[in-house]
Amino acid sequence: MTKFYNFTFLLLIFFLSLFNTVLSQTTSVPYAASNSWTCPTGVTTVTVQCWGGGGAGGGTTAVPDGGGGGAGGAFAQKVLSVTPGNSYSVNVGAAVAGTTGSGSTGNPSWFSTAGTVYAQGGAGGGTNNGAGGVGSSSSSIGDFVWAGGNGAAGTATYGGGGGGGAGTTGIGGATTTSVSGTGTATGGGNGGIGRNASSNGAAGATYGGGGGGDAWPSPRPRWQSHRPGELRR
């Protein structure tokens, strides 16, 4: 009997196509965190799809400055032989949080081992009008891999938008403004919107959207005149 398993993860998706002989069956199994998968009886081949996590948007400590947006996470797909009864590790790339400094690289997602099927996370955005994270698939492992989209640089008026996540149909969408990059039509999450006020950048969408950069625009004067002879904070 032929069985098809579709495993879905928060930042890692497996489409496990499981083959035997007579009949066909498709099963979808979502994962929201790292775990393990035990190969069922009669299953000998799987097709694994992995999405890496998006990079965090950059922060800022100066006025007026904006942080760069994080890059989208990469996508990897590979057909593997498996053994019934064996247990295989499932690593789901957890989200990364932004700070006032440069954004952290997104966490990778992989199946079995980091050298089997591997989707790298997107690069984080720079701080204080820093560059956006650059999407890449150079360290990803699969029969085919796609890079996440680039994040936008921060400016004096806004934080850069996050790049879109890659997916089964290609690379993630890049952005050059505070608007988020678009994820692929199948599977890739949109990037987060960059801010134009003193606040944190928005988180990217699953799967694999990069985070938007935060912003610290020019403040209003500390003292403002409300009527002649009166000053108020």
Image: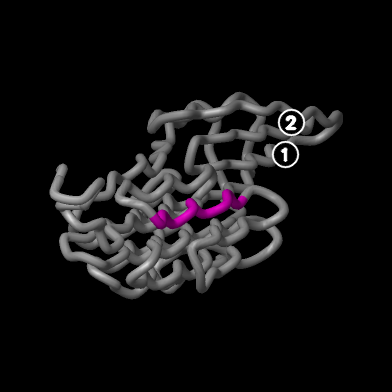
Q: In which quarter of the view is residue 172 placed?
A: bottom right
Count numbered badges in the picture: 2
Which element type, helix, strand or loop, lies under badge 2?
Answer: strand
The residue located at (41%, 57%) in the rendering is 196
The residue located at (54%, 58%) in the rendering is 180
Q: Is residue 18 left or right of residue 133?
A: right
Q: In which quarter of the view is residue 181 placed?
A: bottom right
Front residue of 117 and 186? 186
Q: In the rendering, at what x and y percent does residue 16 appear?
A: 63, 40
Front residue of 91 and 186? 186
Badge 1 density bin: few <14, some 14–19, many ≥20, Cα 10 Å: some
Vertical relation: 108 (above or below) 33: below
The residue located at (67%, 32%) in the rendering is 5
Vertical relation: 65 (above or below) 97: below
Badge 2 density bin: few <14, some 14–19, many ≥20, Cα 10 Å: many
Q: In which quarter of the view is residue 182 placed?
A: bottom right
Which quadrant, please, contains the N terminus?
A: top right
Query: What residue would you read off at disc 2?
Result: 3
Q: Amino acid at mark 2?
A: Lys
Query: What residue would you read off at disc 1?
Result: 19
Tell me whether the residue at label 1 lies in contact with that at label 2, contact meaning CB atoms closer than 8 angstroms: yes
Disc nearer the start of the sequence (1/2): 2
The residue located at (66%, 35%) in the rendering is 6
Which element type, helix, strand or loop, lies under badge 1?
Answer: loop
- Residue situated furthest right in the rendering: 23
Residue 42 on the magenta segment: no
Front residue of 37 and 81? 37
Q: Is residue 233 left or right of residue 124?
A: left
Which segment is the magenta one? 188-196
